[in-house]
Amino acid sequence: MQKLENIRVLITGVGIKPVRHIFRDIVTNESSHTPVIHNGDEYKANLGASTAFSCAEAGAIVHLVARSGKNLKIVKDWITRSIPRAKVEISTIDLLDKQETEIKLASVSNDIPLYWVQSLGLGAGTVKIRDNNPYLKIDEVSEEFIDAELSVLKSTYMTLQALLPRFRKQAETRICIVSSMSGIRSFVSGSVHNSAKGAISRFANAISLELAPEKIYVSNIRPGGCDTGLYDENIVKSRIAKIRESFGFGSDPDDIRLMPPSSVGKAIVNILSSDGHITSVNIVARGQMPHEGS
């Protein structure tokens, strides 16, 4: 029996980005993104897309959620071509619309237990910001940027509220909330981004305490930088180089180390299928700052 057989995994925040830069693994020197090929074009899978692939590979029925139906279809095609037995369902939902979220999530089949992976964020393309750059100095921050970052917490909360009635009827439920290492270690140009990720991380911890007695087990996944396409812009690379320098890891923007999103997806499969309740996991790329504090 496969690890996630007879489980449906709802994954919110599924997306892709075009390849604009190639980052390489410090050990293998191979490209560090998880490639999605569609009609001859190559994209970088984000954490949600990669997690969907890993869960489907482990035997789960995966139900993918995003705003963009086009990207969802590309990800579904990628998974079903790569894994012939895969069962992939898709829903386009604006998770900031409470009524739409409740109606569409209520229509997800309840024939088998439902687990949830929340991977909404900047890398998902759900939140739009200038130059894909969340690493802003204090004087660069706008009200719109603050609202964009904090909208992830709001949509996560509304999704949880919509799903809780179903989760409470199940014998057991697993939830993975993907936050970030940025939630536990601050850095220059990170005042808003650190705050927003910290909010998601603390949210995951708080609901874990509240829901565990109901056999709803929440895990907080904190990845460092992943090669999702978010870091391909020159301005983002230059800011990351400054952050690396402040941690003593050099200042060359061409020496940035990122991990493939697939490494996070594989970790999530293990968490969802574990006999224990794994409360939190920190994951960084080889060659990336391993600091768990500022």
Image (cartoon, rainbow, N blue to C red):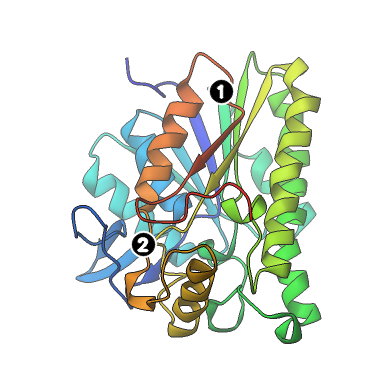
Depth check, front residue: 133 or 53? 133
Residue 102 location, x and y as percent? Answer: 74, 46
- Marking on residue 274: none
- Residue depicted at 49% across the width and 28% down the height: 271
In the image, residue 41 above or below residue 75: below
In the image, residue 149 above or below residue 223: below
Classify residue 287 by image quadrant. bottom left
Q: Identify which amino acid the numbered label 2 is placed on.
A: Arg
Q: Answer left or right for 8 relative to 184.
A: left
Of pointers 2 and 1, the one earlier in the residue sequence? 1
Mark 1 neighbour density, 10 Å: few (under 14) some (14–19) many (20 or more)? some
- Marking on residue 257: 2
Q: Can residue 7 be seen by looking at this rendering?
A: no
Classify residue 30 by image quadrant. bottom left
Q: Can residue 203 be seen by looking at this rendering?
A: yes
- Marking on residue 113: 1
Q: Secondary structure at mark 2?
A: loop
Measured in 3D between alpha carbons, the distance from the residue under mark 2 to the one under mark 1, in whole angstroms, is: 37 Å
Q: How many marks?
A: 2
Question: Cβ–Cβ below 8 Å for labels 2 and 1?
Answer: no
Classify residue 258 by image quadrant. bottom left
Depth check, front residue: 182 or 100? 182
In the image, residue 101 above or below residue 87: below
Q: Answer left or right for 58 relative to 195.
A: left
Q: Answer left or right for 223 relative to 34.
A: right
Residue 191 location, x and y as percent? Answer: 72, 69
Q: Identify which amino acid the numbered label 1 is placed on.
A: Pro
Q: Secondary structure at mark 1?
A: loop
- Residue depicted at 78% across the width and 54% down the height: 98
